[in-house]
Image (cartoon, rainbow, N blue to C red):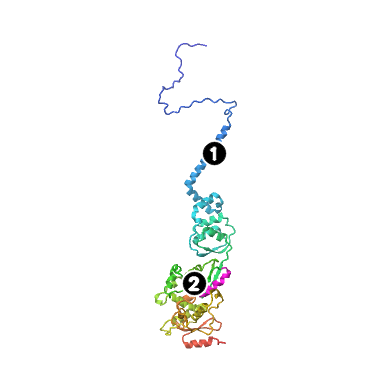
Amino acid sequence: MTIRSGGRPRDRRTSTARPYDPDAYATETIPEYSEPVPRSRGGGNGGRGGSGLAGFLKFLVFALVLAAVVLAIALTVLRPVVGGMVMSVAEDNPAALQLPFVKDIVAENLGTALTTPVSTEPTQVEFLVEPGDTAKTIAARLQEEDLIGDSRAFVYLAVVNDLTRGLQQGTFILRKNMTPDQLVNALLAPPDVKYVDIGLRTGLRLEQITAKLQDLRPEGLNMEASEFYDIAKSPPAELLADYPWLKTILDDAPKGASLEGFLWPATYRVLPDTTAEELVRKMLDAYAENVGPARMDVPKERGMTFYQIVSLASIVQREATLPEEMPLIAGVYANRLDPAKWPLGLLQSDPTIFYIHDTLELAKVPVTDWPKYVFWDTIKGGLTNETLPPELAPYNTYTSKGLPPGPIDTPTITAIDAALEPDTKDGYFYFLAKDDGSQTTAFAKTLKQHQANVKKYMKAPE
């Protein structure tokens, strides 16, 4: 071994060492001093393996909480988008509404559409459930017919309430003011309600309609027939205000005119609790729909108001047996209304006398007994010439000139058209129902011809 002596000791720094600069470390991080961790034999972390699992679990909990927070924030910010997507999925696949998450979002998006009716009017309407219908197709038609505001509300309630199976077919009676929930139950879980069919044939007068309603009470109709009669005889101003066409017509009628002649004959299927005013409104609606504004707009040159046209048509309705003869019968009365052709000025119509007679007789019995009365029946003793109450005297067309004050029944479209366009070209002034079973009518231009028809077609009284 050689021992070296003398000389400067070697500098332990390498040749690349820099001189000390106090600013050189201003941006550097100085590592902290730590004691070395002695290693256990066999490697590892010195016997602290459990602390690694605990750390992982803590991290996992933290990650889940963080994910939940992020999801909540995302749903809050993007909820409209998510809601739209969920609504689209639920609309295409209603079964998805069975998932709580989907159900809640759809309910939130539908909002008041689930509980709000589209109308406050209790008007009854018929709704047909056809073979092959589903909750979705029913809902679409309900919205088309303005019975529900949002068809999805119907589907939602049907699925959530598990009412989509076993749909019943048929015609149901709904009300316009039903809530979506009530509509669902009425159509998909119908209560045991027996509808009432009110069948009203043509040519009935108000008292006959009233008698029919009275007769239906044992069959489940709760309506008071007398209440219907009161409304029809003296319609309230509030009712007329809802029917401008009717108010215009009645403005040309005598003061206090009833609804005689304007309650349309048909078969009305109604709920048992239908009110008298509801039925009156349904009949007025049907009248306007069937008769139409074109017929009601009578030209001034016609010389008659529509109210007078209906009055004439109501007489034609009672006189004619065959619809095709109505224009000729209307023509006879049109000729008699022309003072240049018929100076006498009297219509001499038998149905008006029957109308007077029945009115007087019905006044003697309560409404509850009207179903037993025989209307338009033969008058014992012939035509009446007795003194009549002021309100009935003008209906006697054998003593009062011109048309009666108002209609004596509700005429059909055919009778109204006949009164609008009477057939006067043949100049007939007389007619006679043949008593030979043919149900036809014999017409005559002169009294002599008429008397001949009487001898030919009328059987001698027994």
The location of residue 145, given as percent across then percent down, is 50, 62
Assess whether mark 2 and mark 1 are in contact (beta carbons under 8 angstroms). no
Report the residue at 48% width, 48% height from top. Answer: 79
Which residue position holds label 1?
61
Residue 148, compared with residue 324, is above or below; it is above
Which residue position holds label 2?
230
Q: Is residue 207 magenta?
A: yes
- Helix, strand or loop for the magenta stretch, by majority: helix
Q: Is residue 320 visible?
A: no
Left or right: 281, with 219 as reference point: left
Report the residue at 49% width, 52% height from top. Answer: 109
The magenta span reads: 205-220
Q: Which of the two residues, 47 or 10, is positioned nearer the viewer here?
A: 47
The location of residue 384, given as percent across then percent down, is 50, 84
The location of residue 164, given as percent across then percent down, is 57, 57
Please rate how many residues cluster around mark 2, counting C-alpha atoms within 10 Å: few if below 14, some from 14 to 19, many from 20.
Answer: some
Q: Quadrant of the C terminus?
A: bottom right
Badge 2 amino acid: Asp
